[in-house]
Image (cartoon, coloured by chain):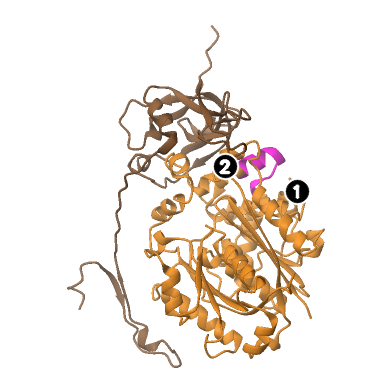
Amino acid sequence: MTEKVRSIIDIHLPERATGGDVWAQFRGVERIALELTQSYKYSLGKVSRFFMELENGRFLATRCAGCGKVYAPPRPLCPNCLAVADWVELSGQGVVKTYSVLHFSPGSNDDVEALETPYVLAYVLLDGADTLFPHLLKANPEQVRSGLRVRVAYSDEPVHHPIHLMHFLPVVERQRP
Amino acid sequence: MSVAPVVAAVGATPVASEHRGSNLRDLMTEAVLDCLADAGMDDLSAVEHGLTSYESDHFNLQMTLGAILHDTIGMIPKPNVRIEGGGATGALALRTAWAHIQSGLCDSILVYGCEKNGRGVSSQTANQLFALSADVDWEMMVGGSYTGFYAAMIRAHMEAFGTREEQFAHVAVRNRRNAAFNPIAQKPMDLSINDVMNSRPVADPYKLFDCSLLSDGAACLLLSTEAWAREHCPAFDRRAPVYFTATGCGSDTMRLGDRYPELTNFRAKRSAAAQAYAMANISDPMREIDVAELYDSYSGVEIQAVEDLGFVQRGQGGPSVADGIFDLDGELPVNTSGGLLGRGAPVGATGVLQAIEVVQQLWATADPRRQVAKARRALTDTHAGIASISVVNIFERRD
């Protein structure tokens, strides 16, 4: 009875109805495998310039024309003032404020699926910014701590989502001779 | 303001890692029939309004579940609305139902919630789908997951206040132990602090037993005016009336990083609590609330919650939890159901299940081993994401 359905996972038929079970006629269960794959024409919208400039090795943020707050990740509109923001360039250096060492990868897309565990998700206060920027910090988890100085590193490899054109690396302090 | 609505009746399925023999319609049917039996009603003909509570079109592989379930349980052609608010969905649904009654739009409304978050998909797919409720461009794509966001928050809490892993392990142990006294709980366990500390790392500092469960389940709550309940629910008189007296709701930025410099606690939860306390005339929640269900998506989140709900001062969550004041025999028992850690968390049903637990506590119909003596006033705390939406609901017994 199962050969005609290619997606069968399993079929469970109860051996015998138990007394008083109002669902006795409905206890046979078939499970099938279903897949759903979608792809999207996905606009990065008004913050597209941030992603385009990553290709040029430049790290952009936005500054509210009203209150001066600097948003990284960028926001085109300051939610506090409802003023349209201006693009500003940051050095790409900053400091880790908090982080987690992840021992599993949710595999959000092709690029992230390749993440080796454990990996570090760091929240970085970039110099000149007022918000924290979350991204991968490629470093030995043992050496990561809040307060660590890091910098944006840019990727030369082709990526799927342009956010992967960057990640963070620890700032290596120059050794004194 | 008019008199608060009453909880006329409740119903639920067991919470399980997988209800293989039931799809969502089946689970919802079982919970609704359970609620009908609790009400002593033969059918839903007298119920005026429906309200469907579910989060994910992706997990369930079905949009418009509101309409489908409304049809399935025989509520056609009555009005229906579907509520979604991430993890807070069930509590937001109840808050919305409260407003329906208070506005006079209807005198009775059936809130029915369900979800299959269990083993219908792999845990990796589950994490991906939940990550879609984060900011896709800026958080999900960089390897972020909710476990990671929560872990970064509790790390900040540890660094700011000296909160220790052993303290949040206490929550993981206690809530799973409470679950043993709840017949619908998914995974009661008798663990030691060391078992939690030695479980495998997931997102440092959170380990396996610090993490809540993925669950299948359904829950249903019939909310009405007291007059409607007395007229239509033959079983209503057998218990002291429990009123849904107050509700608060707050919000916060989606991304943790945008909350800087506050990384340790939940602003939305403080806001929701302040509204609910003002509505219920509560000034000292630690003394004035007798039992509470808190949103323990991760063990440390309960420590943050007891601070943001004003039970203890900020920074005191860790020591107070470890002292046992929120245990079953403590000053203010929380998560008597087992919480998300022990009872489980079918998202659309979770907030409804929390309400059902505290209502049963107020009715004094819980298993005696988890029943809190003389509970008069109860709170539920539910949030979405890392509290981008937070809902606090308050229930009171008056007899």
Q: Which residue is mark 1?
A: B316
The secondary element bearing badge 1 is classed as loop
Instruction: Report the disc number at residue B117.
Output: none
Q: Which chain is assigned orange? A: B
**Residue A171: percent from the left, percent from the top?**
51, 21
**Which corner quadrant of the image does residue A131 belong to?**
top right
The reply to whether dot 2 and dot 1 touch (C-beta < 8 Å) is no
In magenta stretch: residue B155:
yes
Chain letter matching colour brown: A
Mark nearer the N terminus (2 vs 1): 2
Q: Is residue A56 left or right of residue B398?
A: left
Q: Give the number of the mark in front: 2 or 1.
A: 2
- Up-down relation of residue A177 to residue B235 (above or below): above
Quadrant in the picture for residue B338: bottom right
- Pick the residue in front: A101 or B289: B289
Q: Is A158 or A116 nearer to us in this picture?
A: A158
Question: Same chain, marks 2 and 1?
Answer: yes
User: Which of the 4 quarters of the picture holds residue B149?
Assistant: top right
Q: Is residue B354 magenta?
A: no
Magenta stretch?
B154-165
Badge 2 marks a residue whose secondary structure is helix
Give the residue at x 29% y 71%: A10
Identified by mark 1, the residue type is Gln
Q: Is the residue B306 above or below the residue B258 in the image?
A: below
Q: Which residue is mark 2?
A: B256
Looking at the image, which residue sits at the far bottom?
Answer: A19
Chain at numbered mark 2? B
Residue A20 in picture, x, y percent from top left? 46, 92
Q: Chain of mark 1?
A: B
**Which image quarter holds the C terminus of chain B?**
bottom right
Looking at the image, the residue that sits furthest to the top is: A177
| Other-residue count near label 1 (Cα within 10 Å), few / some / many at <14 / 14–19 / ≥20 | some
